[in-house]
Amino acid sequence: MDRTWFSQPRDRGGGIAGQRSVLTKLRLRDMELLLAIHEQKSITSAAQQLGLTQPAASRALRDMEQLLRVHLFERDRAKGMSLTVPGELVLTRARGLLADYRSMTMELDAYNAGTGGHLRLGVIAFAPGLLIGNLITELIGERHLMSVSLTEGSTTQLLEELRMQRLDAVIGRCSTDPIPAGFTQERLFRQEACLLAHAQNPLVRKERIRLADLEGFVWLLPPQGTPSRVAINEAFAAARLAPPVATVEAGSTKIIHLTISANSRMLGVVPSDVGHDVQRLGGVRRLPFPVALSMPPVSLVWATRHRDTPVVRNVRSNVRDLLRKRRAAQ
């Protein structure tokens, strides 16, 4: 590619006015094209995705690069188009702009429809079902008139979705790692752990279970490296016992129930309130964990710059209200 136009002298007197001129010439359509090229690794495929001709897409990309005075992509016949370092910087901002635009249009659509907006909420599988159910009931009720999309996954997966601005907030585990920059985390509550076992498991008939009694069973555990798995391993290490080896790793309550209810030698470890939910499905018993085991705290996480948007403000205030009511009832 001809790079001579990047060597043109910059306007040193433009200052902020010059930056504004650049911004006014960039369009949301340009941001969508940038994101599509990155995802498709091809201008032709990106153009098809956006309903553009290939020449029009190439011209738009060239105009963006000339306007910003940087190359946004490297071309490689084998790997396709990949972002340059400046391209990565621009793409990060482009994602933010597009997410803000989508949020604005959803809020305006909600206003015009007389509703309270749309919340994209990420939830870990081990969040108490009663809390999540009551939260959704409050948000979609007459007070807020919101709609909600729920995504279930691990805390790591959900935080990545939040970073990519595909979610508005996450109910997940507090990790020992620092919260990523740009996020705000509010600790909500802790959960004590319990055992889950098949209804015919011999442990069900024991009056008192010790950690040593758990040897010889097969285990279904949270995925390796998750905060819950780390807490389980630490409990065994504190008793000078080898941590259990997972035959099955799962974070879905549905999978946990189906797997343990089909295997009389399998044990699982989940928060006690989640264990109660699983036991109600039948074929599985909730048992006390042999030692005190507190799972890592559950927290609410959101993008700091979105803290005052209506959807984030509503989910924050309603989670707090529900937890206050739960504590008062205990």
Image (cartoon, helix red, strand yellow):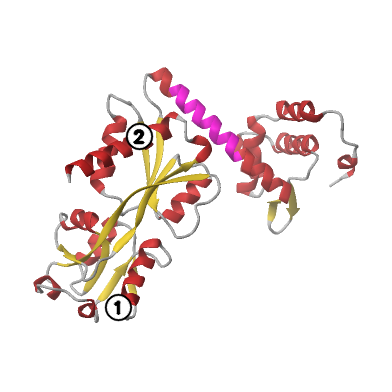
Residue 317 numbered mark, or none: 2
Classified by dominant secondary structure, the portion drawn in magenta counts as helix
36 to the left or right of 327: right
Residue positioned 38% across, 37% down in the render: 316
Badge 1 marks a residue whose secondary structure is loop
Res 239 label: 1
**Residue 221 in view here:** yes
Considering the numbered disc 2 on the image, is that residue within a helix, a strand or a loop? helix
Magenta-drawn stretch contains 102: yes
The tally of labels here is: 2
**Mark 1 residue type:** Ala
Name the one closer to the observer, 244 or 258. 244
Say if the magenta span includes residue 249: no
Q: CA distance from mark 1 to mark 2?
A: 41 Å
Report whether residue 152 is seen: no
Question: Dividing the picture into quarters, in which one does residue 76 lie?
Answer: bottom right
Query: Residue 61 location in percent, x, y?
Result: 73, 38
